Image (cartoon, rainbow, N blue to C red):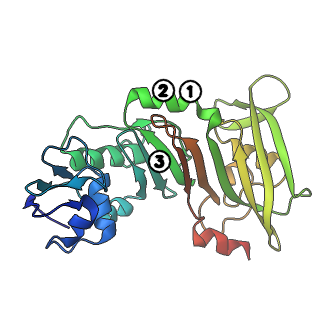
């Protein structure tokens, strides 16, 4: 990938993506697409470039410095960018990384790391992302961030229309292969969630058993509501706590982490309304505990 600004004068008509691949920079197709996606490429006389922008003889193509995607650096911090445009960012978060700052940790969070990354990427100290939802610290998988307050509000207002699926490995095997869990949840002073007969907030989770092991099961869970610790509390109430969830009664912890993973997000783009669908595989170390 280039390390300083490069300018090239086009000699004959061409589309932009194929042209980038002919440059003496050794760009792979993926690298060229990343440069376009992160708006590191500009063309004289063209306001907004695309992969199929038509170049004319005499156009000047500039590849800006400092706009590459330091994916390896991000992954060392525990997250990976799955999708980014001018309005939203979808990331894949590693277990152990907070979604946002807390009293005890303000620096090492997905929100802070992503903000710092985008500031460097755009060379803009005012660049920031806005939290749309959270994942528990020990839950891995997909998260959405907004790149403006307006987009944050739009996504949150339409949150019920976003399909959110999780994978969990639980202790034991549920009696029914699928079902719907409905509970009223309240939070105690100790910040622990509890099921109650009356009051609280309604939590609805749909589940189905995907695989059965000797003493554990792999479940797919679809959230209809988004309460704090919802999946963990409801599965514990079913008698099948998430593996590794000592807080809610699990007795086993073979992977030394919570066996819960945000595996799928499906929604319409908040600006273009285009259908968006993202998947993330459950970490191998969790799947291996099912044997």
Q: What is the distance, in whole Å, between disc 2 and disc 1 at their CAs?
A: 6 Å
**Residue at the disc numbered 2:** 153
Residue 260 drawn above or below residue 190 = below
Q: Looking at the image, which residue is at 64% across and 29% down? A: 189
Element type at mark 3: loop
Towards the viewer: 12 or 74? 12
Place of residue 11 in the rendered image (x, y in percent of width and height, measured from the top left): 9, 64
Left or right of residue 52, residue 80 in this image: right
Of the residues under marks 3 and 2, which one precedes in the sequence? 3
Image-quadrant location for residue 2? bottom left
Q: What is the distance, in whole Å, between disc 3 and disc 2 at their CAs?
A: 22 Å
Mark 2 and mark 1 in contact? Answer it, CB < 8 Å: yes
**Residue at the disc numbered 1:** 157
Q: Nearer the viewer, mark 3 or mark 2?
A: 2
Of the residues under marks 3 and 1, which one precedes in the sequence? 3
Residue 39 drawn above or below residue 162 = below
Place of residue 94 in the rendered image (x, y in percent of width and height, measured from the top left): 49, 58
Towards the viewer: 266 or 131? 266
Tag of residue 8:
none
Q: Residues within 10 Å of mark 1 (few under 14, many from 20)?
A: few
Element type at mark 1: helix
Q: Nearer the viewer, mark 3 or mark 1?
A: 1
Place of residue 266 in the rendered image (x, y in percent of width and height, measured from the top left): 59, 47
**Residue at the disc numbered 3:** 98
Image-quadrant location for residue 256? bottom right
């Amino acid at each position: 990938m280039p390390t300083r600004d490069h300018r090239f004068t086009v000699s004959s008509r061409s589309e932009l993506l194929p042209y980038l691949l002919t440059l003496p920079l050794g760009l792979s197709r993926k690298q060229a697409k990343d440069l376009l996606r992160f708006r590191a490429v500009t063309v004289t006389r063209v306001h907004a470039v695309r992969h199929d922008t038509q170049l004319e003889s005499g156009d000047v193509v500039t590849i800006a410095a400092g706009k590459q995607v330091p994916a390896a650096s991000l992954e060392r911090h525990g997250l990976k960018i799955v999708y980014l445009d001018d309005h939203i960012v979808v990331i894949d978060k590693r277990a152990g990384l907070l979604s946002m700052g807390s009293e005890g940790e303000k620096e090492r969070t997905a929100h802070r790391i992503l903000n710092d990354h985008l500031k460097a990427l755009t060379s803009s100290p005012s660049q920031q992302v806005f939290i749309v939802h959270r994942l528990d610290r020990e839950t891995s998988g997909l998260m959405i961030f907004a790149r403006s307050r307006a987009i944050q509000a739009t996504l949150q207002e339409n949150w019920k229309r976003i399909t959110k699926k999780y994978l969990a490995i639980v202790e034991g095997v549920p009696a029914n292969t699928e079902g719907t869990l409905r509970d009223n949840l309240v939070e105690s002073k100790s910040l622990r969630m509890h099921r109650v007969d009356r009051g609280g907030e309604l939590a609805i989770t749909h589940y189905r058993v995907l695989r059965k092991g000797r003493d554990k099961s792999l479940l797919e869970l679809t959230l209809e509501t988004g309460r704090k610790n919802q999946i963990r509390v409801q599965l514990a109430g079913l008698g099948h706590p998430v593996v590794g969830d000592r807080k809610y009664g699990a007795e086993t912890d073979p992977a030394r982490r919570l066996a819960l993973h945000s595996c799928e997000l499906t929604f319409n783009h908040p600006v273009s309304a285009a259908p968006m669908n993202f998947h993330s595989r459950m970490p191998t170390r969790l799947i291996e505990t099912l044997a």
